[in-house]
Amino acid sequence: MVKRSLSAATIAAQASGYIDAASGGVVPPIQPSTTFVRDRDYEPHRTGNIYARDHNDAVRVAEDLLAKLDNAEAALLFPSGMAAIAAVFRALPSGSIVLVQSQIYWGATTWIRGFCDRRGMNLIEADLSETTQMEQLCATNKPDMVYIETPSNPWLRCTDIAHAAKCAHAVGAMLVVDATAATPILTRTLDFGADIVMHSATKGINGHSDVLAGVLATNSPLSDHWTAMAIDRHDAGAVIGSFEAWLLIRGMRTLPLRVERMSQNAQVVAEFLHAHPAVEHVFYPGLPNFVGHQVAAIQMTQGFGSLLSFTVKGTALDALRVAGKLDLFHRATSLGGVESLVEHRFTIEPHTGIPENLLRLSIGVEGVQDLIDDLEQALV
Ligand SMILES: *Cc1c(COP(=O)(O)O)cnc(C)c1O
């Protein structure tokens, strides 16, 4: 029999074939215990289970599943996406040179700036979705690490991961990619040459707006950098609780299904907005005339994700008026959940270069005609 690897849909639906050894349950139990017994010979009852900060079964199952979905050898879970990003930077030696994409998730940008300042890191920020810029900045600065986000939030800039990996590796740098908006279903980031992929699992991976989590995955679990991160997580205690890990496992069972429907819905919404006279510009990789479309078409399979932004003709007040008239879209931050959200980023981050008339949408799994009808009545 030819052995072939299972599809993401199968791996996710069955939580990678998990059966609870103790009960035969097809879902893992939630184990709240923070400590685990040893026998009379002082051997742990179960290898690896000593204390909940070290590790626990639910975290191991979730990490195994996440690694498989990203075609990775190892994954590390963190209590939030930002904790995962912080782990990546904290494990770099002081004085490192880091090349970071500009106009990405604002929380990452601000934390990275402060951290690099405190730790004497040489931080270079630039629009790395431009290939010539990426090439030149790598060659002239010889960074230790290149950090990109694709598609970026909220601009949907698409960076060529394979090209970025080539530029980074040519000068001995590692490439770290925040692929939150793509999820492991649309882009298997490591397959394109990235050294580490990061996701805020709070978003599409969990998908139900009820867990904060972050994940890193790699094919070089023996590298000094990965080892340093694993040790730091253990020693400094940025660990996720077993209930959160359990919710993640539950959410991930439908991840491929949700991502497929959300991408289909988002494509329809993007095309509707693109044709609407009250809309100035639509930022969505699935639109054939969008700048990032060519790159996205290569590295995003089965759809272009749930995140899109658009500018309303007019001012901030016009954009806020549209947001205020929406009935179905919740006016809330975040993305990747089953319910559709709208956000006026300018209200949150007025001095970051975000256009005042931009609205960011996270498209959920609702009936797409209901979403279109809602936008239609709000845009008039
Ligand atoms: C939300 C988000 C993060 C941060 O994740 P948290 O889980 O909120 O800490 C990082 N990157 C991107 C692209 C995000 O959307």
Image (cartoon, rainbow, N blue to C red):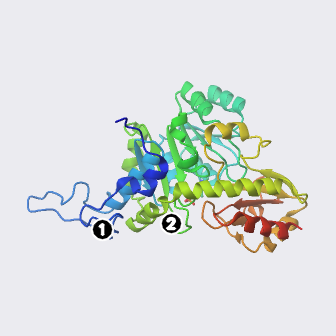
How far apart are the two marked residues, 2 and 1, measured between alpha carbons?
20 Å
Q: Quadrant of the N terminus?
A: top left
- Identify which residue is drawn at 42% across, 42% down: 226
* x and y percentages locating residue 357 in the rendered image: 84, 60
Q: Is residue 63 above or below residue 30?
A: above
Write down the residue under mark 1. 34
Q: Is residue 321 left or right of residue 177?
A: right
Residue placed most toward the observer, 61 or 51:
61
Write down the residue under mark 2. 211
- Identify which residue is drawn at 60% across, 64% down: 337
- Identify which residue is drawn at 77% across, 64% down: 372
* x and y percentages locating residue 233 in the rendered image: 40, 53
Q: Quick one: label 2, few (<14), some, or many (20+) residues within 10 Å?
A: many
Q: Amino acid at mark 2?
A: Val
* x and y percentages locating residue 60 in the rendered image: 35, 55
**Which SS class for mark 1?**
loop
Name the disc covering residue 333, or none: none
Q: Amino acid at mark 1?
A: Thr
| Label 2 vs label 1, nearer the camera | 2
Q: Can residue 250 be spotted in the picture?
A: yes
Q: Is residue 369 above or below residue 289?
A: below
Q: Is residue 357 above or below residue 173?
A: below
Q: Can residue 355 be spotted in the picture?
A: no
